[in-house]
Amino acid sequence: MPTAPSHLLYRAFRLRLWQAMHDAVPQGEQGVYADPAELPPLDPSDWGERQREAFESPEMTAFVDTLRVDGKDVRESLLDDLATYHGITPDQAREECLGWERSSADEWRRAGASDGERGRVEFYRSTRSWAFDLCWWAYLQAEGRADASNVMALRFAQQHVIGRRHLDFGSGIGVTSQLFARSGWSSTSADLSSTLLDFVRFRHERRDDEVTRIDLGEAGLPAGAFDAITAVDTLAHVPDVYATCRRLHAALGPGGVLIANFDIREPSDGTAWHLYSDAQRPLFDLRRAGFVPIGSVGYGLVGYRKARAQGVGHVARSVWAWCVLVSPARRAARRITRPALRRLAAAARRRRG
């Protein structure tokens, strides 16, 4: 039986190895979502400890409650949200949820998003498909078919943040803000997508949730206004991570916490809006913007404490981050180890499949 310190080291090693394998073989096109109603019974035997704790927690009960409306279950509620808002049937809403990626690729092409920033902004401002994607993703989390990222983020914030002022940056359909608001926080949903924010307003008003909203296409973030910022699956869509993280740094009060990840993907038609296939450079930009990692959250999310972004200490931290993330020696080491990590990832997929 391993001692407690050795057990913690083993868990840390497994986490780092899993992350390295994931970075070596980022996911390409996702394809059609699975429908939990058509899947075998849930098998939690290969869940990690954080997923198990999150799924069994009071915060998960609160998360499920944020999704339900008018006494319906989660599936019925989310499909009713989409059907009512878009003027379609629940069956049509389900089909759009399952095939959202194809619709999103069409929207990306119509906006000319591959041609530059103007097209990308047009895509984000006007996307319709992402509401279907994010509703279904929330449903999968509630069913235990996806990592409970929102619940993990709340649980981490409750343990590491003193204040209760929350911002969800890249808020999508607003479920993270709902969860924080129902857990005693004041919460703000901020997004560049005006279409998603309109849907957020509709969902929040249906459920009587009091959440402030910021349209990032029309307004900036107030300085020092938040104690915790979540950016779940958001920063991979940002073309200038350093500038964005400087704005998040300024929006946090002293000692505030950012909870974020980089959802990297292999380039393809179905991942065009994921701007990075390697997390090292954007991660370095986050670190040099003035954030210091304080712990793993789960789902690839990491908690970062706001630190002073100037002075000798900041320079030293930035140099260290450069050495371990993007220096020539580090890039050379990754080129050497990537083939072995890809083989390990393939073996892990065969074992689980």
Image (spheres, helix red, strand yellow):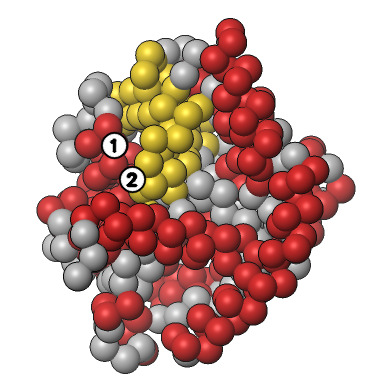
* Residue 295 percent across, percent down from the top left: 37, 41
Camera-side residue of 12 and 350 = 12
User: Is disc 2 in contact with disc 1, using a CB cutoff of under 8 Å?
Assistant: yes
Q: Is residue 169 left or right of residue 273?
A: left
* Residue 335 percent across, percent down from the top left: 77, 60
The residue carrying mark 2 is 153
Looking at the rendered structure, the kind of residue marked 2 is Ala
Q: Residue furthest top?
A: 311
Please tell me whether residue 67 is drawn above or below residue 310 in the rendered image: below
Looking at the rendered structure, the kind of residue marked 1 is Ala
Please tell me whether residue 207 is drawn above or below residue 229 in the rendered image: below
Q: Which mark is residue 157?
A: 1
* Residue 265 percent across, percent down from the top left: 65, 61
Q: Secondary structure at mark 1?
A: helix
Residue in the picture at 54% in, 45% down: 234
Q: Is residue 66 left or right of residue 212?
A: left
Residue in the picture at 35% in, 55% down: 9
Q: Is residue 193 left or right of residue 5?
A: right
